[in-house]
């Protein structure tokens, strides 16, 4: 059984006090939720305060990125060893990092290794752009990202990873994919490569989220699909009621 996981990627939103206020409301609105792993990923500067605000709650904490070196002259970067006292999860390879900050499968691979070494759970994002989809390249692009981003990991390491299938054209556009399409991509272009890398049993145990314009209104469509084990949520994670609605829809459907 794969436990569904709903993670909120806050991106570059919320001041420290706004972040604390959001999780104060969220921890109350989700207090009765069971059997859904819940995660919020605020900006680095809010992690400490949000960690305190979440103490004793069921909501886990994640970061939005991690650098692969352990320490040294890397101005502006944050190492996995610095994060591990604060967070349990870390988003890696988000399409915005690929698009705006030169992230590649090779750098994703280095970050995943560093995160695992520190005992963090990586949430590794993959997904095709609109141009790639229209050129019929979705299968090739997504499986290539999985095979290269996770190359060299052991099956044991892979067990703790979460993947997020996020078609780039669906992120922040209000144009979500469909449950059937996302389910098919996860089955064919994510689980098959995972199985090649780590064997079928491990591939079947790895959780794969869908991400891209998920809302409380459409969450059930994705969560009702057998290959989809949760959601990575951007915009709708910034309002407690919307994020809670997605979590509740997941708890009902799964
Ligand atoms: C994301 O940033 O990972 C995301 C899925 O954003 P949104 O939900 O806003 O499309």
Image (cartoon, grey):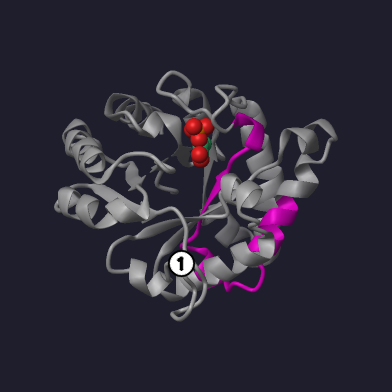
Asked whether 150 falls inside the magenta stretch, the response is: yes
Vertical relation: 9 (above or below) 104: above
**Residue 168 percent coordinates (x, y):** 64, 37
Question: Can residue 250 be seen by looking at this rendering?
Answer: no
So how many labels did they put on this image?
Answer: 1
> Which segment did they paint magenta?
143-170
Is ligand 1 less than 8 Å from the beta carbon at label 1?
Answer: no
Which is more toward the observer, 47 or 201? 47
Q: Residue at x 82, y 41 (%)?
A: 137
**Image height check: is 123 above or below 70?**
above
Q: Is residue 237 visible?
A: yes
83 up-or-down from 90: above or below? below
Q: What secondary structure is marked by label 1?
A: loop
Q: x, y percentage for residue 232?
A: 47, 40
In the rendered structure, does residue 90 fall within the stretch colored magenta? Answer: no
Side of 4 where 193 appears, left or right:
right
Local crowd size for mark 1, using a 10 Å CA cut-off: few (<14), some (14–19), many (≥20): few
Q: Quadrant of the C terminus?
A: top left
Q: Residue at x 63, y 42 (%)?
A: 186
Residue visible at 61% across and 25% down? 178
Would residue 100 be found to the left or right of residue 120 on screen? right
Q: Nearer the viewer, residue 81 or 189?
A: 81
Residue at 70 percent across and 41 percent down: it is 128
Q: Residue furthest right?
A: 135
The residue labelled by disc 1 is: 77
Q: Is residue 32 left or right of residue 200?
A: left
**Residue 160 image position (x, y, % from top left):** 46, 62
Residue 158 in the image, given as x and y percentages of width and height: 54, 65
């Amino acid at each position: 059984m794969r436990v569904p996981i709903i993670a909120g990627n806050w991106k570059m939103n919320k001041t420290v006090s706004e972040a604390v206020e959001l999780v104060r409301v969220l921890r109350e609105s989700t207090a009765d939720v069971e059997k859904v792993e819940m995660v919020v990923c605020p900006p680095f500067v809010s992690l400490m305060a949000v960690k305190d605000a979440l103490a004793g709650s069921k909501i886990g904490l994640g970061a939005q990125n991690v650098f692969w070196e352990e320490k040294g002259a890397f101005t502006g970067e944050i190492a996995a060893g610095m994060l591990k006292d604060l967070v349990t999860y870390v988003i890696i390879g988000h399409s915005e990092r690929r698009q705006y900050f030169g992230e590649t499968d090779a750098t994703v691979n280095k970050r995943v290794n560093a995160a695992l070494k520190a005992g963090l759970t990586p949430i590794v994002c993959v997904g095709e752009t609109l141009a790639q989809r229209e050129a019929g390249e979705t299968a090739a692009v997504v499986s290539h990202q999985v095979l290269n981003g996770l190359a060299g990991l052991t099956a044991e390491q892979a067990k703790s990873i979460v993947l997020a299938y996020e078609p780039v054209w669906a992120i922040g556009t209000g144009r979500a994919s469909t449950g059937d399409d996302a389910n098919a991509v996860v089955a064919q272009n994510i689980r098959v490569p995972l199985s090649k890398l780590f064997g079928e049993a491990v591939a079947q145990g790895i959780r794969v989220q869908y991400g891209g314009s998920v809302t409380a209104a459409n969450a059930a469509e994705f969560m009702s699909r057998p290959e989809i084990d949760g959601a990575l949520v951007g915009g709708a994670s910034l309002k407690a009621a919307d994020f809670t609605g997605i979590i509740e829809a997941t708890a009902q459907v799964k």
